[in-house]
Amino acid sequence: CPGGGGDEGGQDGGGGQRGAADGAAAAAGPDQLEGTGSIADDAIHLKRRVGLVSGVALIVGTMIGSGIFVSPSGLLERTGSIGMSFVIWMACGLLSLLGALSYAELGTMNPSSGAEYAYFMDAFGAPPAFLFSWASTLVLKPSQMAIICLSFGKYAVEAFVTECEPPEIVVKMVALLAMVVILYVNCYSVNLATSVQNVFTAAKLVAVLIVVLGGAYKMFEGHTQHLMEPFKNTKFSIGNIATAFYTGLWAYDGWNNLNYVTEEIKNPSRNLPRSIVIGIPLVTICYALINVSYLTVMSPMEMTTSEAVAVVFGARVLGPMAWLMPLSVTVSTFGSANGTLFAAGRLCFAASREGHLLDILSYVHIRRYTPSPGLIFHSIIAGAMVMYGTIDSLIDFFSFTAWIFYGGAMLALIVMRHTKPTYPRPYKVPIIIPYLVLVISVYLVVGPIIDKPTFEYLYASFFILGGMVFYVPFVHYKLRIPFMDGVTVFLQMLLEVAPTSTMLE
Ligand code: ARG
């Protein structure tokens, strides 16, 4: 298959990983399938179980997480007006759709799982592919986890201290507590993690429905005063608009999730683009309605100062049932965090198996068959991010890094139209679309730096490129550190984990 090149590095260790990867993939729910391994390493035969409905559910379920319950205030603050916020919310939906359509071509052309990793390998070779797995294992996935857990903490605490600012340290402690519980669930059993995911995904849809119906009711009562003069006070600055996009795009993140599980989609050349065309506009409509709903009960001013908009909304609309709102949001964020850690663990597991990270991270618990070292590793990084970061700073940091790679995928598509013209392309996106998304991603990455250069962006860039310091000796020249084997054995005994090859014998 043309995508074979995308996984060259995985051939050697692939056979050994079959047990855990298959076990986990077989039990994983839709939200959790990203990063379950690569098709070309031949060891992992994933059944084609995802049809159109589950494809749509996979996209919608991943995209709707914490963002829509937390981001509206940040976005409004950055744009200054409800009209401009609304335009950006819709533009984020459109950008996600265009990005996802381009990913549909990439995904149907190169059917390997692992999305960007495989495409970079095909288009640019091993070093950029390594930098992607390096940055996503160490930064992207943990920061997703940290943002969602912080949102969980915020809503869980806010439920008890309605309409006043909850103490930051308490929010962080609750976020860490949630992280530990989720880590335990994921290390304990794949089935438990999956069940938690399914129950919590349903709850998130209930939360969305409550807000939309509540807003519609208030609208009928005639509460439209805050929707007048929508563009008053708009702030027009390149950097503000770009960072406002970051906030909105966080709520839409997950639009490329189906590309992580391409080999499990039934008739992917048809169902991948269709799921995208149905799923993303659906989320966009939900977000538009939720934003209008919020404004039926609070003024733009209140919205920017409110720490947890959905709680305020619940308090004003649901009367004695107000507790429903923070509860469903905490449940929804807990579910997203669970799915995100699961995926993160799989990604870590897959990247280390391909010789890109430490061996120990690809080991699996000897009885529970969970990739616990990878999960623990991710949780430690995410825990540090929870302690030292805030939701907004982490979202900026995440989006900056993520959009470098989304832009990179667009470039990969354009480059491969020229370098791999004979690859089969069952779905071909109009070439103007990836060009457009590429230009926008350059703007999204460069805009905030030009407008307000902060050290975070510099650190993030150094961090990504710094991966080369490890790539050259350890991946390219396969250098071994002498004492590392001792450390690996020690950790192996401590955590009761083993390489999956020994467990299959
Ligand atoms: N859009 C989600 C939210 O608003 C975050 C999704 C994180 N991304 C992912 N691929 N799991 O919380």
Image (cartoon, helix red, strand yellow):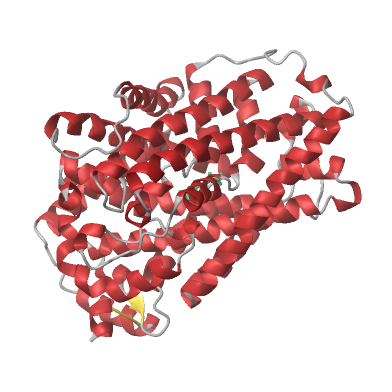
- Tell me what residue is drawn at x 34 percent, y 61 percent: 348
Residue 164 seen by the camera: no
Seen from the viewer's position, the closer of residues 424 and 14 is: 424
Residue 305 seen by the camera: yes
Give the side of residue 458 with respect to residue 230, left or right: left
Q: Is residue 454 above or below residue 227?
A: below
Q: Is residue 365 above or below residue 168?
A: below
The quadrant where residue 435 appears = top left
* Residue 433 on image: x %, y %: 35, 24
- Tell me what residue is drawn at x 36 percent, y 59 percent: 48
Seen from the viewer's position, the closer of residues 255 and 120 is: 255
The quadrant where residue 173 appears = bottom right
* Residue 321 on image: x %, y %: 86, 52
Quarter of the rendering occupied by the C terminus: bottom left
Please tell me how many numbered marks the rendered image carries.
0
Seen from the viewer's position, the closer of residues 32 and 149 is: 32
Give the side of residue 397 with respect to residue 64, left or right: left
Q: Which residue extends farthest left? A: 477
The quadrant where residue 480 appears = bottom left
Give the side of residue 151 with respect to residue 58, left or right: right
* Residue 130 on image: x %, y %: 23, 50
* Residue 421 on image: x %, y %: 14, 33
- Tell me what residue is drawn at x 24 percent, y 65 percent: 353
- Tell me what residue is drawn at x 50 percent, y 73 percent: 191
